[in-house]
Image (cartoon, rainbow, N blue to C red):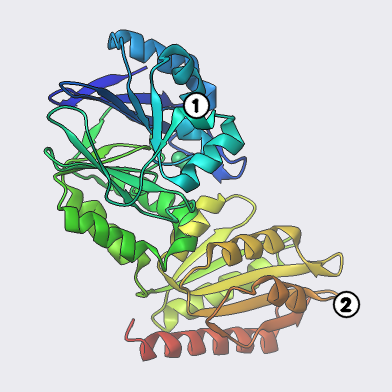
Amino acid sequence: MAVKQISKDIYLINTLHWERRLFDELIPLPEGTTYNAYLIKGKEKVALIDSTDTLKVEEFFNDLKYLEVERIDYIISNHAEQDHSGAIPAVLDKYRDAKVVTNEKCAELLITHLQIPRERIMIINENDTLNIGGKTLRFIMTPWVHWPETQTTLLEEEKIAFTCDFFGAHLATTDFITEGSPEVYNSAKRYYAEIMAPFRNIIPKNIEKIVNFNPKMICPSHGPIYSNPQLIIDAYKEWSSDRVKNLALLVYVSMHHSTEKAVRILEQKLVDYGVQAKVMSLTSADIGEMAMNLVDAATLILATPTVLGSAHPNALSAALLANLLRPKTKFLAVVNSYGWGGKTLEDLKNIMTNFKGELLEPVTFKGLPDKEAEEKLNNLAKIIAGKHRELNLI
Ligand code: FEO
């Protein structure tokens, strides 16, 4: 339970979820998360922006009680996903005159996922405004950050942008308002990598809409509020750009150390040729770390043994996730230790259908890497360095 006034008559209702370690039963949350709602008291009406997760409805009502909220006229729903809309049905039950204010796409999803009665929803469109008495809320559509219905609410007089997931960070902290810190930057980058990256092509248009508003403050619905919005705006511009770094991300799984031995050889060769290498075991690293590195890496190398006639299931899973994240990675290579055959290369290639870069010649070898395999690994590192040099990364 945590409530904080962030400006005159504007309150952050921050449901801290310190203990949560997984989102969507998929995404690791090493730092927990928060679900941020905002209460804005106008001279005539009271608006609530978003709510909290279905799991935290009771805590949310404790916060409303703490703030002595007697009326809510509007519940602005910027995003229908249940971590922000979970308490809306209960809020509608308690505040009988309240209306949900949102766009048509979001309304459909709220009706579908939370069974909110349509008659309690007021539809707004791009650039519509809602004056609650001395405070004007303007709605702009920011689709695909990260659902099709996502919108942003702008508070015109105070120049605050309420962006929901957009610019968010899975970070439980009571340092509610940040100027920017490495911890927040890393959490925001991880969040971008896991949630926003697949929509990289549409993000610049949405950034531009926020920039045009020239916000003094960005209030997302996960993690801290940005009192210096330029930092997170610049970070998003960089992450969503086509620019890559001189980084080869080498993710591997190894059963009897043959693949691992090849990884160690390749690691050294990459270093020798001036390529920065990041090596990650798929057995111990979390997928969020892989996603974060894919935001920058020019090259992805998947190293796997052949087992059960294909790539190791951890490698198949990593390839599937990397494919779904649609990274801007330019080069992809596979390193494979096999025993007697299998469809490892074919299966990995068939998974990576979204990959638009260049597929480099794979390195395959039987059992432990021998001299010939070492030469192939050396050649792969040399080729990667050459490709990075062509892009002026080295
Ligand atoms: Fe934080 Fe897409 O929900």
Q: Residue 281, position in %: x, y? A: 59, 57
- Please indicate whether residue 247 sits to the left or right of residue 46 in the image: right
Residue position for label 1? 19
What secondary structure is found at the residue carrying circle 2? loop
Residue at image coords 42%, 48%: 150
Residue at image coords 56%, 78%: 332
Between 340 and 199, the one lying in front of the other is 199
Residue at image coords 34%, 14%: 64
Circle 2 crowding by C-alpha within 10 Å: few under 14, some 14–19, many from 20: few
Q: Earlier in the sequence, mark 1 or mark 2?
A: 1
Residue position for label 2? 340
- Please indicate whether residue 109 sits to the left or right of residue 13 in the image: right
Residue at image coords 54%, 29%: 116
What secondary structure is found at the residue carrying circle 1? loop
Note whether 386 is above or below 317 in the view shown: below
Between 169 and 83, the one lying in front of the other is 83
Q: Nearer the viewer, mark 1 or mark 2?
A: 1
Q: Please report contact status of discs 1 and 2: CB closer than 8 Å, yes or no.
A: no
- Please indicate whether residue 209 sits to the left or right of residue 109 in the image: left
Q: Amino acid at mark 1?
A: Glu
- Quadrant placement of the N terminus: top left
